[in-house]
Every structure is written in C-alpha cells, then in structure tokens.
Amino acid sequence: MLLQRLGEYAERAAEDLPAEYHRAKVIDRVLRLSADGRTGELEDRRKPAKQRAEALVEYVPHVQRSGVKVPPYLLVDTAEFVLGVPNANGRNGLTDKERAEAERRHAAYRELALRWADSVPDDPAATALRTYLTAPDVARPALDGVGHKEMVAVRVGTCWLHALPSAQGLWADVVRERKGGKKERSGLCLVCGEHGALLATIPEPVKKGSVPTTGGSNEGQLVSINTAAQGRNGIQQLVNTPICHRCGGRAMAALNHLLASPTQSRRFKDYGTFTWWTREAGEDPDLTPTLNDQPDEATIARLIDSIDDQPTPRAADGVDPDAFHGLTIGLNNARIVVRDWIDVPVPEIKHTLGLWYRQHGVHEGWKRRIRHVPRWQMALSCGRWDGQRYVRDSAPIGLETELMFSALHGSRLPARVLPLLVQRIHADRNIDAPRAALIRLALNRTDHYRKPEMPAALDETDNHPVYLWGRIFAVLEQIQRLAVPGLNTSLRDKYLPTAAAAPDPTMTQLLKNANGHLKRLHREKRGAGIALETRLNEFLGRMPRGALPQHLNLIEQGDFLMGYYHQRQADFEAAAEAKTSANDQSQAPVPAQPSA
Amino acid sequence: MSSTTAGARRPARGNEGWAFPDLVVETWGELACFTRPELKSERVSYPLMTPSAADGLLQSVFWKPQFQYVIRRIEVLSPVRWARVRRNEVASVPNASTVAAFQKDRRRRYDVEADRDQRGTTALQDVRYRIHAQIAVSAKARAGGNGFPPASEEKYREQLRRRVERGACFSQPFFGCREFTAFFGPATDLPPQTDWNDELGVMLHSIAYTPEGERYRWFRASVRGGVMEVEQPLPEGAVAVADPHWRADAGSGSGGE
C-alpha cells in the first residue's frame, strides 16, 4: 500500500527526484582543486542566518549513519572528514582522543574518495583528486577558523565532483553495501513482489524538520525495527520485512520529496504532517488549494456540485484512471508514525470534500452569503475567546488534524468537539461563524440526527421546540437591546448557559422580564415593539405547552445554538436589506413636480 | 480410505477439488490490528483480516495435530473504520539468557519504567468477517496406526461446527493483538461490503515452522466486492528466511539503525 504508492510516485516523478541516496544540503566551504590537483584553495561560502536564501545548496550524498565509527560520505562531508579538522568544542578543549578521531575520519574519507578516483582512471577530475590526496608536495589550504561541522564540497575547475554520474553510481553501491547487512540476502520484496537483494535497514530517514513535533524535531525512520519487542521473535532489523534496495530507496526519496513540497504537504504544529499525491501527473486545480485549506468560493462550489456527479462507467467498474493518496505522519522520537492513510479514486475524494463544505457552510446575514470556514479556523474556534480574538495556543492539540481526517474520510467529528465547543460558548458567550459551522457539521455528522440535515440558514419550517427556543432567545435578546439603549450586559451574557442547561424555567423567567421591555418599546418605539411581540407570540404559539425538555443534552444544545444563530443572521440580513433599500431610495432621482 | 481433500484430479469435481463445502465461521470484535510487516514498530493494520490471522482464530476454537486449516475466502461484513491508540509498552522481550540471569541472581529486579517504549497503533474498529475454510487432514492421520483408527475429515468438520455453535474455544480468539478480543459464531446472512474493491499488494499468507526457522509465505491480495479470495501463496523460492543470526539473544550486537 503505502510503500508501493510511494514507489509508483518515485517512478513518475523520477526527473524531479535527486540521485539515489542524495539530499539537498547547504555547502559552507568549497575545496577548489587546480586541474592538476597540485594546489587546493578553500572558498568560504557561508552566509549569515538572515541571508539563508542566498546560501549554496547542492544535492550531495547522504544516508543515515550512526555508531562509534561513523562512516564517511563520498566526496562531500563535514570538515572533520574532508579536511581532518578536529572537534575543538568539547568540555576539555582539544584532546588527543578528538585528534585521533579526526584523523580516523579523514583517513576513511580519503579511502572512499580514492576508491571512486581509482574506479574512473581516465577522468581528469578524478586524477586531480587522487593527486591532491596522495602526493606529498601538494599546496593545501590553511584551516584557521574552519569549524569541524562545516560542510565541504570539492570542485575541480567548474566541475562538482559529487555531481559526476560515476560518483553517484559508486555512492549508491556503497550505500547498498552498508545497508545490505552483514550477510547478503535476496528474496521476494513485499513492496514490488519481485526477487531482489534485500535491505537490512532502510538507508534514508525522513528529513529532520519535515515532521514537526513537541520537543523539537528529529530524523525519523518509517520502517524500523530496532528493539527486540518490535520484531517477530525478538528479531531486529528488516529480517521479517523483506524490502529490496530499489523499493526502500525509492519510497523514502519520494516521501522526502513530497514532504519538502510546499503545495503537496501541510504541517500541523506539534502534531505531524499531511502529504498527498495522485497517481497521474499534474496538479488538480481543485484539490491542491482545498487540501492546503485555502480554497476560494468557486472551488468550493465546484466541489459541492461534484456531489451530484454520476460516476463514469469506468469508475463504476472500479477501473478509475486516477487515484488520490493521502498520508498523515507524526514523529515518535526517531520513528515515523503513520496516523492516517487514504487511497481512493480522485472523484471519490472530491465528493467527500464537497460533502464537508456542504455540511458546514453557515449563513452570514450582513454579507448575505453562505460562508465556508477553513479547518484551522474551526480548530482555533475551540480555543478561548478573550473578547477580541481567540487566544493563541488555547485550541486543543491535534484537533485540526482530526478535523482533516474527518474531511478526508467523510466520517464523524471527534467526540470531544461538541462538548468542548459548548463548554467554551457557555464560558465566553461567543457564537460566530466558525463555531456555528462546527456545530452544524457536528450535528450533520451525528448518527440518527432528528432530520436529514441542519440547513445553513434559518429553517422557517422547523418546529422542533429546542430549535424554536433558540429563535425565541434571539428575539428576547433583541427586545431587550431595543428597549434598553447602551446596554452593558445583554441577555446572552447573563442567561445563555442557563438557557441551554435548563430551558424551561429560564424561558418562564425571561418571558416575564420581556413584558417590561415590551411595555417600554410600545411607549417609545411602537412599530418595533409590535413587530417583535407578534414574532414572539408566533414562536410561542408554534411550541406546544410543556414541549421544552427540562434539560438539554449535547445534541439539543447544538440545536438551540443553531436556532439562536440562524435567527440572528436572518435579522441581520433583513436589516442589511432594509439599509440597502433605504440607500437606493435616497439615491433615486426625485420625480419632477407637476407644473401648476 | 480415499482422500477427501483436493488432489491433482479433483478440480474436475468443482469447488476447486474440495469434497465438502467450505466451513463458514463468522467473527467480530471492537478492535483489530493485523499488523503489516513493514509498519510494525508503530503498528499499522492491513485493512482486513489476513489468512494467517483467520487460521490462528480457527485454531483457538478447535485444533488437532492431525489436520490443518486452508483459508479459502474472507468476507468483510462491516465498513473499514480506523482507530488510533498509543500505549506504553516495553522495548525488550525475555529470552533464555535473561531468565537464567534472573535465576542466578535473586536480588536482580526488572524495572519496567527504565525499559519503556511508547508505540502507536493504527487499528481497525468494529470489524466483522466471515471466514470460509477447509480442513486438510494429513496423510499420516488418514492412514491411522499406532493404535489410532484412520482419521476422517468429516469428524473434524463436525467437531468444529459443534464448537462454533456452542461458542467453545481452547483460548479466547483475538484480532492480531491479545487485547483485541474476537467473538465468533455461526454464519449469518449479513451481506459483504460490496462497494469495496481494492488491490492490497503482497500480503502474508501463512507461516511455516521448519527446523531451519520460520518461513513466510506471501500472496497477492485483492478485494472484490468486499470479498478477498485467498489464492495460493507465491512460489517456495519467494520467501524470506529469518536467519537465527539476527535473533536478539544470539549476541548479534547493536542491530540498531
């Protein structure tokens, strides 16, 4: 599944991928050799942190390495390997042990570099390197100020040695020797299903920083069995997991390539990374912005329209030409955790995403439109509202990713969403579009909800007592607002939690209070008073006596809040229309006075 | 006594050479993790039960050394739903040398907190399968001898059927992890998930326990209309053999990556 699909992607995107076991790295210094290899100069290419974009970046040999005797990379490595600069940053300064280690590393580097030079005896660049490394009377550069960790690449004239095909080929062989294990094994690869030489460990980890996590970042292995409890019968490494060199290398190169792509991966703070690709080449104009959580309204409209598309005959037969693959990974210390994997035809994922937008869009009265909310904003709205904005980092960790899983799979929202949201609304009394959208979505994705779908805007035909109670609460609030100008604490501020928790006694109390407000309105704003009283009586008339429960459960509280939100937005829309028509009338040409 | 299992000339009979119809057992549970071999440190399950898991499940209901099960087909009766759990586990497993060391030094203690390894599991939720299997009685058992009468396939089929009907088992079956209990019973008429068609790639077919060690057999798995037909495993040469050299207690050294 996952590894096969990554392998297929690697085959399709072969031109974009670096050479086998190569990775982009910043080069700090360049060792420039003369054409005869008799002189070497060190060029400083370091850039300050602010000018990171101007740094010299090259695809250079890389493979995971560890242990006491760290092996070298071919041709491009740290100054400790290339130049023999010892680590002088230890607690006791430069010691004999560190000098000896630098010598060992440099010797290992020379040995590997000479192995390449000897493999291409006719290459002038290789001859120059051989001369530089072996001749006793070579002019070598001074190493003052060179840090042992600085990355050094080698160049002869204008030719990067690591970019030569012979060097890339030899490096791939060296990696296979290192990662094939002590004993050569061959057999069936469970990824491609063909015979081949098998890996003992996966050579390339997921690059550091690709998968954010709490407590910093690390390189991570997707396929790794390195403790006794992880392997079958206590057996470590890939002994029971036959993966050939080709599949192991290609899958990881593809994964790193996808994770580095700004359009095909999305990182979630402290939680992980989502990456996706399709079987066929070419970016889908609707999928890319949607999965990046930045779709425009036209894209959303197309996705919603696709819900009603009939499957093509090929798709109906299960022979769909294009497939969508989505992978969400997290990091557990140095191991990659597959949190989610989806492999479905492209029309199906579009259908599922269209459903997500259709089920959460909410009416915005003043703007007279249906608003769709990005997932990050929904997750943020589960955080604390301080009166101006949502407090940073107060949203639950991992919620945005869980919402994305729900969007991709068309599944229910996590169980914690609705209780958390209702609790927050009770605490800060803020019901805005992101919160209303999330409540609507939670209701629409609840099994056995009382009606097929909670609509985006006011449902005039819905006579459910709890929904009506939400609408009544909005009318009572408006009566109070109009009756008491300059109000400090509104009905919502004071009574929203009790109205949701114990609706019946709260309604009795609020209706009693409203009588006073209505009297005042009749006295001061007669028209508005009559209109609001009529509406209140209409709602009360539609609700049978005793129909309202003593307590509302979570779903009913969602209904109540949606009734309240919908009624308010409908009022806003009516106000916006009244304002527009008033403006139109004021701008209309004055009819000519009939002449006497 | 004539053989009742598939022979070279039997396919002409139909039912691919099997003399009896498939035995059908239905099984269900809340969680299941049929761990993929490539993703087993942070476990990820196959999307459905593997034939080797079905074999283990039937064996925990009824097993005798005289026969083995041949899993023929697995029907998926519930939609594939995923769940994620993270658990505190340990990094090491006891082996003979550790046990000997504990026996030698009575004051030695095992501190589980110092051996922690937190691992995630992407498991299946609310699963239900219908397993179709056949019983293959060994030639030795069919021949009888050593005071035993010749064994017949009908005898074992009936024993399994009776045990399934009354819910008897040697040990409680489970779905991949011991914590994920499986329940079982006779087949119902629930339809499979007919809209599920998928190519699942190479899947574990079964494990053979040989004197040289375990041998893993694989097959190319695919689901058509919510049913996975279990084909013959890939050829004998196409197996990975676990070399005892790699055993953790064989002093293989670091072994890490």
Image (spheres, grey):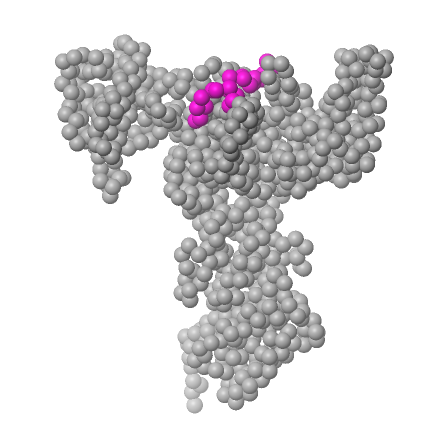
Chief secondary structure of the magenta portion: loop
- On the rendered image, what quadrant is the C terminus of chain A found in? bottom left
- On the rendered image, what quadrant is the N terminus of chain A found in? top right
> Does the magenta-highlighted stretch encompass residue A194?
no
Quarter location, residue A504 = bottom right
The image shows a total of numbered marks equal to 0
Kindly identify the residue that appears in the image at 24 percent across and 43 percent down: A50
Rendering coords of residue A242 (x, y %): 53, 22
The front one of B15 and A554 is: A554
The front one of A507 and B209 is: B209
Q: Residue furthest top?
A: A121
Q: Which residues are magenta?
A: B236-257
Question: Up-down: is A506 above or below A356?
Answer: below
> Does the magenta-highlighted stretch encompass residue B238?
yes
Kindly identify the residue that appears in the image at 47 percent across and 50 percent down: A397
Quarter location, residue B137 = top right
In the drawing, does residue B18 fall left or right of residue B127? right
Kindly identify the residue that appears in the image at 50 percent across and 36 percent down: B111
In the drawing, does residue B39 fall left or right of residue A273? right
In the drawing, does residue A325 fall left or right of residue B184? left
Question: Up-down: is B7 above or below A79?
Answer: above
* Residue B79 visible to the viewer: no
In the drawing, does residue B208 fall left or right of residue A283? right
Kindly identify the residue that appears in the image at 63 percent across and 27 percent down: B221
The front one of B213 and A350 is: B213
Rendering coords of residue A537 (x, y %): 63, 79
Rendering coords of residue A105 (x, y %): 28, 21
Rendering coords of residue A405 (x, y %): 54, 45
